[in-house]
Amino acid sequence: MTLPFPGARAAGDGTDAVTNDADSADPVDDADAADYLVVGAPLDATTTFEPGTRFGPERVRRFARTFDDYDRRTDSRFSEAAVHDAGDVPAWDDVPAYLDHLTAELRAAAIDDAVPLAVGGEHTVTWAGVRATEPDVLVVLDAHLDLREAYDGNPLSHACVVRRCLDGGPDGNHADGRRDDADHHTVDEVVVVGARTGSREEWERAGADDVTVVPPEDAGEWSELAPDLDGRDVYLSVDVDGADPGFAPGTGTMEPFGLHPCEMRDVVRGVAGRCVGFDVVEVNDRDDGQAAALAGKLLREFVLSHRADSNR
């Protein structure tokens, strides 16, 4: 049995959650009372180099067990943040159908006034998070632009997720070829922080007015300007490969010259208060837990920062 994210309570579970503090608070045990909902999304269908993202949600939960419940910066406990863990939405090989199902699960959380926290799984699951929460802006921490129209003929590849969130399916259709009268939600603007590689076509698309690319060396300065997002709903997606692979080698497509974990933390802190949804993705099982630990810590930073901003 997979334990819930440390400091959160699983659905219908009357037992105490696992924390690293003996005097931690009892986490919320009612999904309807949750302010944040962790949802595992172990999709591993289009990984282009080293697979294993199907193991991401379990590893993120496991390597977060050593974190202290108390946070000095916010003078608060994670277990007091009303975080509920709904477990995983099991993936299958029909990616469009899976994304529809995951969208419905995440949308249910948003309808209940909880902030969905998706734990991937490959980056494609962000398309479900955006459809569920309908933000104005997508902020992505990522080594890659992910702006391809299709990769190896597949418009739902993880290499295309930012393009899907901006432009929807190819030629105005759904990405799996279906048509209907109500197209999926797309964002008005994307900010990709930490991007350092992409195809020529991706860089051309990134030159449009609705895309901002922040290279790793400018991430710190950008995080201080995040208040420019005020008044707009934001979805924050953290691809763990945004970090330099020396810090997070357990990911499918490593790219050197990346972000320091503290730079990623500062972006999360700067954006969290404006967010309607969050995910952390692309963790696999090919390291000693470094990527999973970073992912879990950034999820905690998001919750603690979002809660602190909400209580001001």
Image (cartoon, helix red, strand yellow):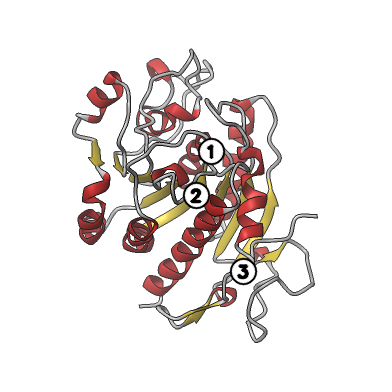
| Residue type at numbered disc 2 | Asp
Of the numbered discs 2 and 3, the one sitting upstream in the chain is 3
Q: Nearer the viewer, mark 2 or mark 3?
A: 3
Residue 256: numbered disc: none
Residue 104 at x, y percent in the picture: 60, 42
Q: Residues within 10 Å of mark 2 (few under 14, many from 20)?
A: many
What residue lies at 35% left-to-right and 59% top-to-bottom?
A: 274
What residue lies at 25% left-to-right and 39% top-to-bottom?
A: 213
Q: Nearer the viewer, residue 162 or 195?
A: 195
- Left/right placement of residue 1 relative to residue 81 reads right
Of the numbered discs 1 and 2, the one sitting upstream in the chain is 1
| Residue type at numbered disc 1 | Val
Instruction: For the residues labelled 1 and 2, say whether their Cβ atoms are less than 8 Å apart.
Output: yes
Label total for image: 3
Residue 125: numbered disc: 1
Residue 215 at x, y percent in the picture: 25, 43
- Residue under label 2: 279
Residue 66: numbered disc: 3
Q: Element type at marker 1?
A: helix
Q: CA distance from mark 1 to mark 3?
A: 27 Å
Q: Quadrant of residue 26?
A: bottom right
| Residue type at numbered disc 3 | Thr
Q: Nearer the viewer, residue 88 or 110?
A: 88
Q: CA distance from mark 1 to mark 2?
A: 9 Å
